[in-house]
Amino acid sequence: MKLSVEQAIFDRYPGLNIVALVVRDVENTTPVPDITELQAQELRFAQALFAETPVSAHPIIKAWRAAYQTFGTASRYHSSIEALVTRVVKGKGVSRINTLVDLYNIASLKYLVPVGG
């Protein structure tokens, strides 16, 4: 596997950090109770964090929104972390797809960063 990022991206976003993780030989279909509980904790954390503050007003979400707008996308689209937190705050929860998606959703909610796989 090779991950490459054009230098122009780092020139445009000098504080950018990219993290990649390769996971192999993982049984990814059966829910893991500890991960399910951890995800529930992060859902409660996000709901509490945004109980009094609109999602779009949080400084980290605002920073992602500003960065996302520099990508030249239509303004009606938001970063994945803003969409995820908004969904959670509205009580819609997070759909279970598989264990790895559960894990990166947990990381997204815990650190308020967009994570994908």
Image (spheres, rainbow, N blue to C red):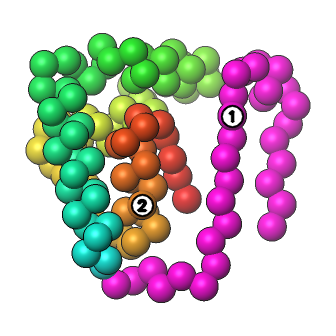
Determine the secondary structure under disc 1. Answer: loop
Pointer 2 residue = 103
Determine the secondary structure under disc 2. Answer: helix
- The quarter of the picture where residue 26 lies is bottom right
Locate residue 72 relative to residue 52 in the image: left or right: right
Count of numbered labels shown in the rendering: 2
Verify whether residue 54 appears in magenta.
no
Residue 39 visible (yes or no): yes
Q: Please name the residue shown 75% across and 19% down the image.
A: 14
Three-letter residue code for mark 2: Leu
The numbered dot on residue 83 is none
Instruction: Tell me residue 75's x, y (percent).
Output: 44, 20
Quadrant in the picture for the N terminus? bottom right
Question: Residue most toward the front?
Answer: 34
Instruction: Tell me residue 101's x, y (percent).
Output: 43, 63
Q: Please name the residue shown 20% across and 27% down the image.
A: 50
Instruction: Tell me residue 5's x, y (percent).
Output: 81, 41
- The quarter of the picture where residue 15 lies is top right
